[in-house]
Amino acid sequence: MRLFEKGSPSGEAVLTWWESLQRSPGDRANLRRCSTPAETVFLPASHRLIGEIKETSKDKIELSYDRLCAIAGILAHIKENSSQTFSKQMSQKKPGSDQALVSDIRFRRVLQSSSIVEDELFFQKIIRVIHHLDQRANILDIVASLYFWGDSVKKRWAYDYYGTSNPSENENNTTLQGIQS
């Protein structure tokens, strides 16, 4: 199984951590107050996420603690787990409108971002997008996408957003290939 895949030990650890965060309003509020990825490093809730993922790893996979802390800050803004991919959610139409929940220009600005850790604006853009989606997002999709952020994730998001995804091509070109949990 791949890292952060549904049913994988690491994916289950993320979901368990997120569910416990929903029951801990203080930790959730502290993470939500973070305006930069660096601020998330100083909170115990972020380190609990790292610890839970590390415990699931049979192989000693080298994890990016900074990315996981930033992702913890993002996940604190999600109130409901969705089954739809994050990129498809962004393209859904507003009720009674032809406009997407996340505009084309906002979506393209998100794709221009370099890294969830190095780009403070990317961190803030993702949080804004989550609020545009009424704080609903696919937890495991957003975790894997942000953790492995790069050209192949950006392409997959573009194909999903514009409705031209080719399922067989996307499965063969995921950034998660070769990453085992």
Image (tube, helix red, strand yellow):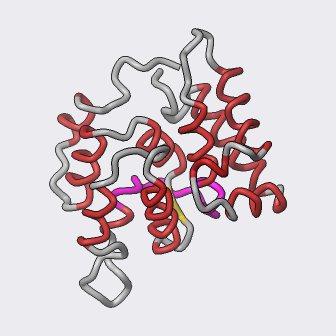
Whether residue 28 is in magenta: the answer is no
Residue 107: name its quadrant. bottom left
Residue 165 lies, in percent from the top left, at: 19, 49
135 or 118: nearer the eye?
118
42 or 80: nearer the eye?
42
Residue under the point 37% across and 28% down: 176
Q: How many marks?
A: 0
Residue 173 lies, in percent from the top left, at: 23, 31
Whether residue 84 is in magenta: the answer is yes
Residue 43 lies, in percent from the top left, at: 76, 46
Above-or-below relation of 26 to 68: below
Residue 150: name its quadrant. top left
Residue 57 lies, in percent from the top left, at: 62, 17
Above-or-below relation of 80 to 19: below
Residue under the point 68% across and 43% down: 41
Name the side, left or right, on which 142 lies relative to 17.
left
Above-or-below relation of 115 to 52: below
Residue under the point 41% across and 43% down: 145
Name the side, left or right, on which 149 lies relative to 161.
right
Above-or-below relation of 123 to 178: below
Residue under the point 47% across and 18% down: 180
Name the side, left or right, on which 123 lies relative to 65.
left
Residue placed furthest toward the bottom: 96
Residue span colored magenta: 74-88
